[in-house]
Amino acid sequence: MKPGQDQTLGFYKRPQGTLTGSISRKDFLRLGGMGLAGAALSTTLPGILDPSSIAAADAATNKIALGAFAPSLPWSFKDIDDFSDQVGNEPAIIHWFQDWVMNFDPEYLNAAVDRGGMPLISWEPWRFGGGLSQSRYALKTILAGKHDTYIRRWAKAAAAWDKPFFLRFAHEMNGDWTSWSPGVNGNTSGEFVRTWRRVHGIFRHAGAANVRWVWAPVAHYEGATPYGDVYPGHAYVNWLGVSGYNWGIPALGRAGRVFPRSSAGPTACSRPLRASR
């Protein structure tokens, strides 16, 4: 798939909005610019993207689709409605998180679509509130098929919904703060790659061609797992994502510092790039 060929962002044809914060209404609006962007950005992922592929993406699209997240999602969309009223636009993307206890619920996605937003689900293979050490969700258990019933049920429900949505599976895997990261719960980088491919394969067999797979590491930092070690391959990814944080330090707020350039990207990838957070 070439950049610009995935027309899912145009599916709802609604005005663009802004990413929300997660606290007060004032901060909800103030933090709006720190958004989720469905666009090609001037950054590189070492070992995955190089400057030439960024240039190709830039040539393919000149639009930015900004989205919104609120901590009340997906159980309530009131914060999203309030946000839209304040900024005068509906978000192009509506983002929420689900763990591996929650089922696929079409009502959540329908609520996003009704508001003109493309659903984006960060699907986390653990249990909310269970802490970092969750051996039940170690990657080896997924590879052993212990979660296949749940994954198949989720995939079949996604296929039955039959509208495009973004699935940000096991994000920020190159950090050390998720139970699916290499070095946590006995996980390895190779197990992460095989897990991604296994889950992707279950969705493929379920006929869930409407799912847009978003591979979203955190911006590289010293000590992070190299991108290339946990990248599942072009055949298993539709969109690249990257999370970046300034840790509340204004001097780090510029995009060039949160998402530093790198020339260490020998492998080009013809996938659109989004800033996940």
Image: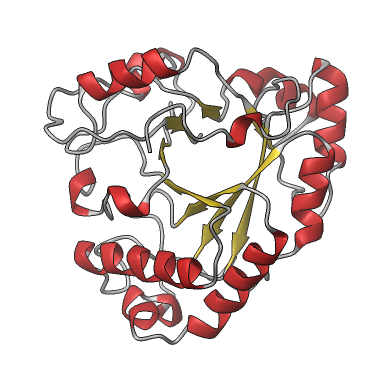
Residue at 25% in and 69% down: 191
Task: Please tell me which residue lies in front, 201 or 131.
Answer: 201
- Number of numbered tags placed on the structure image: 0
Residue 149 position by quadrant? bottom right
Residue 89 position by quadrant? top right
Q: How is the image coloured?
A: secondary structure
Note whether 223 is above or below 124 in the view shown. Answer: above
Q: Is residue 79 left or right of residue 263?
A: right
Note whether 107 is above or below 118 in the view shown. Answer: below
Residue at 26% in and 33% down: 45
Query: x, y percentage for residue 66?
Result: 61, 24
Q: Is residue 173 visible?
A: no
Task: Please tell me which residue lies in front, 89 or 222.
Answer: 89
Residue at 28% in and 21% down: 260
Q: Is residue 207 left or right of residue 196?
A: right
Q: Is residue 182 visible?
A: yes
Please state, as top left, top right, bottom left or bottom right, where the N terminus lies in the image: top left
Query: x, y percentage for residue 94?
Result: 69, 39
